[in-house]
Each structure stands twice: as C-alpha cells, then as structure tokens.
C-alpha cells in the first residue's frame, strides 16, 4: 500500500516536471506567463464559504449522530443475542439474526443516502459551496484574462509544486477581486432598492400636497353643506305640503259635517 502511494506520488511529480519543462520550452518561443493560487487560503478568507461550510458541517454532525445511534442499536441487538443464544431455540436465533441483518442493511443504505456519491452531503455541498467556488473561478478567469496569464495553477491541489515563487501568487488578488465584485453587487442591489422605494418628498412637494388635501377637504365640506341645505329644504317643503293636506282634510270634514247637518234639519222639518 505504501509503495503504491509512493508510485502515485512519483507519477504526479513526473507529470508536473514534464509540464514545467514543456512550459519552459514554449516560454522562450512565446513568452508565456504563469501564476498560481492557493484555493484553500482563498476559500478560508471568503465569509460566504465559511458560513456555507459551517452549515454543511452541522448537517454532517446531525447525520453522523443518527447513524451512530442506529449502529449502537445494532450492537445492543448483537450483544443480547450473544447473551441469550444458549437459551433460545433455533428459530428464534434465526429470527433475531435476520432482524440484525435487516437493520445493518438499512444502516448501509442510510449511510449511502447521506454520504454516497449522489447523497445528501454531495447535494448540499453543491447547493451551498458551488456558487462560491464559481465566484472564485470567475475572479481567476477575470484576472487571467486581464493580465494575460497562460496558466494558473492551484497550489493546494493534488498537483505537486516543487517550488513556488511568492511573487507569482495571485491568491490575494483573487480575494480582492471577489471583494470588489461583492461590493459592486451590494451597491447595485442598494441602488435598485432605492429606485423601487418611495421617493422622499421635498418640503415644497409636501406643501403642495397639503394644499391639495386642504382644498379637497374644503370642497367636500361645501358639498356636504349643500346636501344638508337641500335636505332641509325638502323636509320643510314636505312639512308644508302635509300641513296643506291637513287643512284641506279638515275643510272637507267640516263641509261634510255641515252638509249632513243640513240634510238632518231638512228631514226633521
């Protein structure tokens, strides 16, 4: 095992040396420019990445706790079976062994769901971390395009760097680019919010609005006063008509009574 790891390591060194030699050969021909970054250093200094990693670590702890609990339950079943095996029948032993086997399979499946190639950890990492990694890669591409770098290596990757000159390390430049991009995005977001937010009125505008509201209120008051006067006039007219009707009814009643008295006197005579 150690020898195989040594062979793999030597192959990486050989590949890196071959790449350096090819670059050196082409350097004299085209004047190529090389830079490198330390991805671990960059990510450790990106607040969003730290927050995402903490969220992922919390989920991993929760999943591990659940798996450990299931594993302990299986161990308890195994211990109980070992202690009771002498007094159990063959059928009961097989039944308990089957139960343990099923729980072990469930544990393996659950572990695969959490930590398998397409498990929850992979999905959550992709959801939380990948946007930040894309942000880093975009910053690297922006710098490489602006400064005409031909190659940008990652010092923290599996590619072995036998020597690296600090002056070719653009990690801090990448962080500065990310900070600048974040600042621009924040300003654009604030600008958009300000554009969508209700605009602050000037004193003159407030005064004009107050005058309009006052005029509107005055107009409504006048309208209400007119309605009130009209209603009073209608009520007075209705009352006057009712009085006239009453007088008319009284006259009719008086004439009718007078006529009846005349008819009665006439009959008596």
Image (spheres, grey):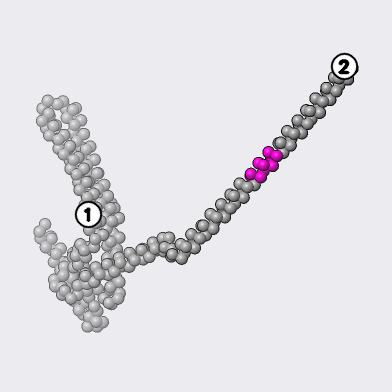
Residue 14 locus on image (x, y percent): 16, 70
Q: Is residue 72 above or below residue 19?
A: above
Instruction: Name the residue furthest top.
Output: 268
Measuring 21% from the left and 52% from the top, which residue is drawn there? 57
Q: Is residue 198 visible?
A: yes
Residue sitting nearer the eye, 186 or 31: 186
Name the mark on residue 234: none
What secondary structure is marked by label 2?
Answer: helix
Q: Residue beneath label 2, please?
A: 268
Q: Nearer the viewer, mark 1 or mark 2?
A: 2
Residue sitting nearer the eye, 68 or 1: 68
Q: Is residue 258 above or below residue 29?
A: above
Residue 264 locus on image (x, y percent): 85, 19
Residue 236 lies in magenta, yes or no?
A: yes
Q: CA distance from mark 1 to mark 2?
A: 124 Å
Q: Which callout, 1 or 2, points at the residue further toward the start of the chain?
A: 1
Q: Is residue 138 visible?
A: no
Instruction: Name the residue furthest bottom.
Output: 29
Q: Residue beneath label 1, please?
A: 54
Quadrant (top left, top right, bottom left, bottom right) of the C terminus? top right
Packing grade of label 2 (10 A; few <14, some 14-19, many >=20) is few
Instruction: Name the residue furthest right.
Output: 269
Residue sitting nearer the eye, 109 or 135: 135
- In the image, 27: left or right of 81? right
Magenta region, main secondary structure: helix
Q: Which residues are magenta?
A: 231-240
Measuring 29% from the left and 53% from the top, which residue is drawn there? 123
Packing grade of label 1 (10 A; few <14, some 14-19, many >=20) is few
Q: Is residue 236 above or below residue 3?
A: above
């Amino acid at each position: 095992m150690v020898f195989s790891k040594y062979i793999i390591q030597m192959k990486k060194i050989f590949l890196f040396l071959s790449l350096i030699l090819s670059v050196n050969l082409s350097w004299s021909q085209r004047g190529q420019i090389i830079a490198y970054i330390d991805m671990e250093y960059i990510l450790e200094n990106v607040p969003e990445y730290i927050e995402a990693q903490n969220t992922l670590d919390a989920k991993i702890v929760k999943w591990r706790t659940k798996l450990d609990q299931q594993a302990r339950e299986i161990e308890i079943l195994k211990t109980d079976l070992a202690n009771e095996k002498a007094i159990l029948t063959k059928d009961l032993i097989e039944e308990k062994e089957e139960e343990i086997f099923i729980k072990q399979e469930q544990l393996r499946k659950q572990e695969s769901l959490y930590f398998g190639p397409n498990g929850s950890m992979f999905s959550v990492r992709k959801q939380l971390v990948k946007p930040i990694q894309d942000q880093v890669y975009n910053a690297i591409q922006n710098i490489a395009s602006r400064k005409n770098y031909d190659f940008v290596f990652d010092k923290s990757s599996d590619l072995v760097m036998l020597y690296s000159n600090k002056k070719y390390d653009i990690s801090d430049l990448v962080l500065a680019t990310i900070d600048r991009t974040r600042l621009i995005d924040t300003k654009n977001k604030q600008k958009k919010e300000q554009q969508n937010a209700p605009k602050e009125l000037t004193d003159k505008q407030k005064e004009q609005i107050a005058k309009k509201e006052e005029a509107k209120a005055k107009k409504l008051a006048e309208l209400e006063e007119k309605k009130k006067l009209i209603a009073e006039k209608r009520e007075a007219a209705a009352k006057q008509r009712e009085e006239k009707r009453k007088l008319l009814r009284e006259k009719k009643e008086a004439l009718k009574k007078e006529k009846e008295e005349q008819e009665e006197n006439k009959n008596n005579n």
